[in-house]
Amino acid sequence: MNNNDIFKKLRVALQLRDDQIIEVLNLVNFRVSKGELANVFRSEDHPNFMECGDQLLRNFLNGLVIYLRGTKEDPKQPMDVLNSIKAAKVPLKEVYKDESAPKKTYAKEGDKKPFKPKATAAKKPFGKGKPADKKAKPENPVERFKFNTGKGKK
């Protein structure tokens, strides 16, 4: 197991987004961009894959301690921090259930257009259809087309 695997597993276990990881790294004055962070989380066979060095993982772990426990001057309870993160997340059911979206309202029932299916004629089969007897070969549709070769007619 390498540093990339450890970093990925911590990210999943703590349910951290990229901007939260950058915030954790900023607590220990370690600057990293979102692009560099995304390269660390890529698969090993990707061309932009970047190996997570010891310094990045060490600074992330030190920042994580400060993020969850706080400093000596301002201590925090880790479970309170994790619970506040969970409380801030909105379940997917709530995101898609959005009832605040305006719905179309019609003044009268007659304003609403009734549904009418499109009237289409029965579809004709391509070519001449099925052969009458089984021994006859079906027509090849390509043979009906005339190809213009670009040569002038004489």
Image (spheres, rainbow, N blue to C red):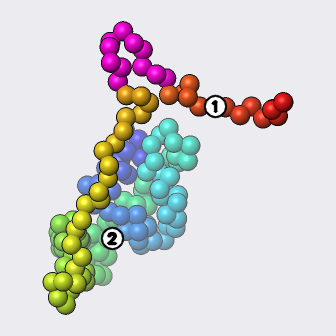
* Membership of 44 in magenta stretch: no
Callout in the foreground (2, 1) = 1
State left or right for residue 45 relative to residue 81. right
Front-most of residues 49 and 82: 49
State left or right for residue 62 relative to residue 84. right
Taking the spot 32% from the left edge, 14% from the top edge, the residue there is: 133
Q: Is residue 61 above or below residue 132?
A: below
Taking the spot 42% from the left edge, 19% from the top edge, the residue there is: 138
The residue carrying mark 2 is 66
Q: Residue furthest top?
A: 135
Spatial distance from mark 2 to mark 1, Cα to Cα?
Answer: 77 Å
Q: Residues within 10 Å of mark 2 (few under 14, many from 20)?
A: many
Q: Is residue 102 above or below residue 141?
A: below
The residue carrying mark 1 is 146
Question: Label 1 is placed on what type of residue?
Answer: Lys
Residue 40 image point, x, y percent? 47, 51
Prevailing secondary structure class for the magenta stretch in the rendered image: loop
* Membership of 139 in magenta stretch: yes
Residue 96 image point, x, y percent? 22, 69
Quadrant (top left/top right/bottom left/bottom right) for the C terminus: top right
| Disc nearer the start of the sequence (2/1) | 2
Residue 21 image point, x, y percent? 39, 65
Label 2 secondary element: helix
Q: Which residues are magenta?
A: 130-140
Q: Quadrant of residue 83?
A: bottom left
Question: Label 2 is placed on what type of residue?
Answer: Ile
